[in-house]
Image: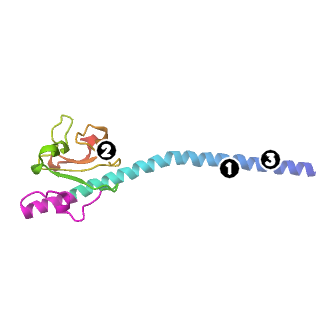
Amino acid sequence: MQLGTDFQRQCRLAWTLIEMMIGIAIVGLLAAIAVPQYTGYHEKARRTETIAAFRAIEGRIESYRSEFGELPETLAAAIKPPPVDAWGNPYEYLNLGTVSGPDMSKIRKDKNLHPINSDYDLYSKGPDGQSVAPLTAMASRDDIIRANDGAFIGVAVDY
């Protein structure tokens, strides 16, 4: 009888191990589905937060313009301390009325290489923290931009 009891115990242990392996596989499968969903949701929330901040920054710039009769030279002149986006990078600002010489290359441009604003450029470098003037460049496609003098605020690839 002892032999049969040991065999039954070993069968129960083996079955428990199989159940545990199946459980781990199910948890792994659920994690493989959930983690990308969560990451995508988190990035969408950061984009939304940054877009909402654009409206507040525009309001501060317009307050500066109404008080002093001109746009600020830098974002720090209108907002102290200068704000940072949802990824921890400072917002980029360029007063187009005062741009000349080598700074002309910093003006944001659409796919036809026309400036996207006539008053000032305001943008976030997005999740990668990199950007160049033409919106068609890979480094600029994830940027959050202000275009058409504030009529469009969103991801550069959607512009």
Q: Which residues are magenta?
A: 56-84
Rendered location of residue 151, percent (x, y): 17, 48
The first of marks 1 and 2 along the sequence is 1
Rendered location of residue 158, percent (x, y): 27, 41
- Determine the CA span between mark 1 and mark 3: 14 Å
Q: Residue furthest top?
A: 112
On residue 20, the disc is: 1
On residue 140, the disc is: none
Local secondary structure at mark 3: helix
Residue at which label 2 appears: 142
Local secondary structure at mark 2: loop
Q: Is residue 101 above or below residue 83?
A: above
Q: Identify residue type, mark 1.
A: Met
Question: Which residue is found at the position 61% from the left and 45% from the top?
Answer: 25
Residue at which label 3 appears: 11
Q: Answer with left or right where residue 42 lies relative to residue 2.
A: left
| On-image quarter of the C terminus | top left
Crowd class of label 2 (few under 14; some 14 to 19; many from 20; radius 10 Å): many
Crowd class of label 1 (few under 14; some 14 to 19; many from 20; radius 10 Å): few
Q: Answer with left or right where residue 130 lies relative to residue 59.
A: right
- Determine the CA span between mark 1 and mark 2: 42 Å
Question: Which residue is found at the position 31% from the left and 41% from the top?
Answer: 139
Residue 133 picture quarter:
top left
* Scheme by which the image is coloured: rainbow
In front: mark 2 or mark 3? Answer: 2
